[in-house]
Image: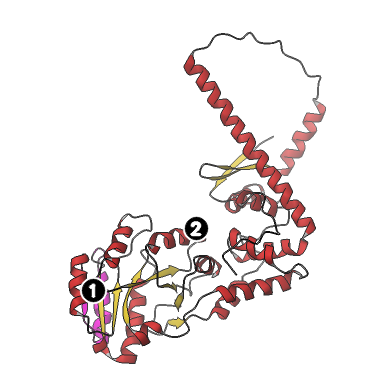
Amino acid sequence: MKIQRFYAVTAREALGLVREALGPNAIILSNHNVANGVEILASHEADFALAVEESRSTMSPINIAPTPVIKDVSGPILDSNMNLIMDEMRAMRGSLESQLAALTWNDQQQRHPAKSGILRELFAMGFSASLTRYLAANAPAESDVEQGLEWAKGTLLRNLIVNKDEEIVNLGGIYALVGPTGVGKTTTTAKLAARCVMRHGPTNLALITTDSYRIGAHEQLRIYGKILGVMVHSVRDETDLRIALDELKNKRTVLIDTVGMSQRDQMVAEQIAMLSGSRIPIKRILCINTTSTIETLNEVTHAYRGSGLEGCILTKLDEAVTLSNSLDVVLRQKLRLFYIGTGQRVPEDLQLADAKVLLERAFQHRHAQSATRYEDSELPIVMASESAFYDFGSRNSDVA
């Protein structure tokens, strides 16, 4: 029998690899967590059936081998053998835990079929395992799948914090837009600047850029500033930033366009320290790319949070297939949502966030071809890998 190994960061990705390589009727032989993610052993259905038939036809009495003579071995060899034995025991333990967890989920599916349906649909929309588990567990026991999904939508609506007025434009202050490269910070800064100029005039606004690394970045913001009639100040370090803010203390609003860098870059911490070290409070707003995966957005949020974020702006909604990834992170991280960016036009493609509209769009992503749609038989494997022995009756979550 041909057995294939599939490795991935999450069980969801590993199952996708199995389905792609062996088809929808693949036989899952085992699954367990490994150092960098999840390992699944699988075989094609035809190969598995053939192996079963061959094993039946070739069965013979078991030959008991003679007891081996135990010889004296050196210390390093003994240590090596013990390590191999321990590794095998750990692998067996992981396999047994996964199988037991899968059996537990099978039992939960039989006792709560509607909640399993809710779980399957939320997965198809692209929400994370942790949020999906909570919503499925806490859905009303007497509800069917559609009623449970409506309840889930209402719960998310109550927990999604949106800014209903234009605080940045109306109240003013000092705001720094932060985030990785390519999320649209400069364009978003220009959109906000245009709104401020239209509301209060160019004399009440100042623009600052710290992006001296990217070729043309300063010039791009300077062009926007020239169109709006606003001076753009360039700073390189914390000292320059303090001097610039002292000079601009009479401005109603100051917008800072920061340099974009990977969330894994150690300079992210230096950037946060620079913005936090100013004598005048600077409110940091994270720009979140709605086309990124949940795992990436989690990393980005943790890296840029630092001592705290004022909120976030969702960008590139015009490019995103679904909003579940970004909304999932915003909900679980309890971020305040200021605006949504829907394109490149300045300032038209920047709108106040409407929680109901955003969730309606996320819940519309339920088509059969979704890469995150699982069959009932696959749910135990996914959920066992994500969280073994989870009980539908538990109600521990930050979402209220």
Colour scheme employed for the rendering of this structure: secondary structure
Tell me the kind of residue under disc 2: Glu
Q: Is residue 348 visible?
A: yes
Residue at disc 2, secondary structure: helix
Residue 179 % position (x, y): 37, 66
Residue at disc 1, secondary structure: helix
Q: Nearer the viewer, residue 355 or 262?
A: 355
Residue range of the region highlighted in magenta in the rendering: 213-235
Quadrant position of residue 156: bottom right
Image quarter of the N terminus:
top right
Q: Residue at x 68, y 71 (%)?
A: 149
- 167 to the left or right of 206: right
In this picture, is 304 found above or below 46? below
User: Gap between marks 1 and 2, in whole Å?
Assistant: 33 Å
Residue 260 % position (x, y): 33, 64
- Which residue position is annotated with label 2? 295
Quadrant position of residue 247: bottom left
- 384 to the left or right of 205: right
Q: Pointer 1: residues within 10 angstroms few (<14), some, or many (20+)?
A: few
Q: Residue 235 got which mark?
A: none
Magenta span contains residue 384 = no
Residue 128 % position (x, y): 58, 61
Q: Residue at x 27, y 86 (%)?
A: 228
- Which residue position is annotated with label 1? 219
Q: Nearer the viewer, mark 1 or mark 2?
A: 2
